[in-house]
Image (tube, grey):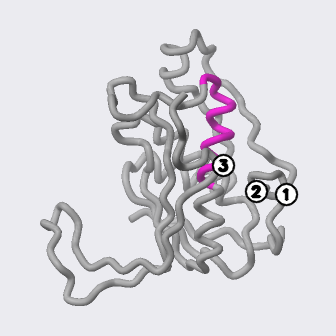
Amino acid sequence: GPHAHVPVDGCIVSPAVEVFREGSNSGYGFFEAPVRLQGFCSVAMFNMNPRVSDSPLDAPREFKAYCHQVKQKFRAVVFAAAQLRAEVLVCPDVGCGVFGNDPQVLGTLFGEVLREPLPEGTIKEVLLTGQVSFAEAVKKAAAGEKVELTPPSYFATAYGAVDGIVPYDRGGGGGRQNSRGRQPKGAPYDRPNPTVVVA
């Protein structure tokens, strides 16, 4: 299959980034002074849209595996932000545009990751951007509300019938683990959850 430049359970970390231009909606105008950020965490979300010709259709074939691997991606971002000592994590509805990931599914998975332990003194607030359904799902899951996820049509259409609601392993009962199966050092279990805010 195609080579994955960014590991499934990893992200690219760019520390100490200066932003000196506005976004496309403002014509990329220059700021009066650059804004310095703790860093950027870039993650490659799965493509579930067969009409996207320049990216492979790389989502796992099985919904439980998909949920597990998406949570690995979000864990990588959250822990990288913690390592950067960021106090605020800004997260868009990554992968919910042209790649066709379901915003409620991704939001729920991200919210569950936010309930997992982190090193003390990091990420006091999470700022959400993008679709409202993504943000609402993050807030519900981060608050501990249990949500049964319905597999998107991608799994039924591409890989056979799916019967309604499919439960998946939420990884409960233990601390968050890194890609080698070990819990990161310095991750207490009594840390308060970050505040989730919708932009």
Drawn side of residue 105 relative to residue 101, left or right: right
- Residue labelled with disc 2: 178
Q: Is mark 3 on a helix, strand or loop?
A: helix
How far across and down, in percent of the image, does residue 110 sit?
59, 52
The residue lying at 44 percent from left, 30 percent from top is 56
Q: What element carries label 1?
A: loop
Please state the extent of the stretch shown in magenta in the rendering. Answer: 61-74
- Residue labelled with disc 1: 182
Quarter holding the N terminus is top right
- Residue 72's disc number: 3
Quarter holding the C terminus is bottom left
- CA distance for labels 2 and 1: 6 Å
**Which tag, 1 or 3, sits closer to the chain's start?**
3
Drawn side of residue 154 relative to residue 53, left or right: right
How far across and down, in percent of the image, does residue 34 sit?
29, 85
User: Badge 3: few (under 14), some or many (20 or more) residues near its Cα, within 10 Å?
Assistant: many
Q: Which amino acid does label 3 sit on?
A: Gln
- CA distance for labels 3 and 2: 8 Å
Q: Please, is residue 147 above or below residue 10 in the view?
A: above
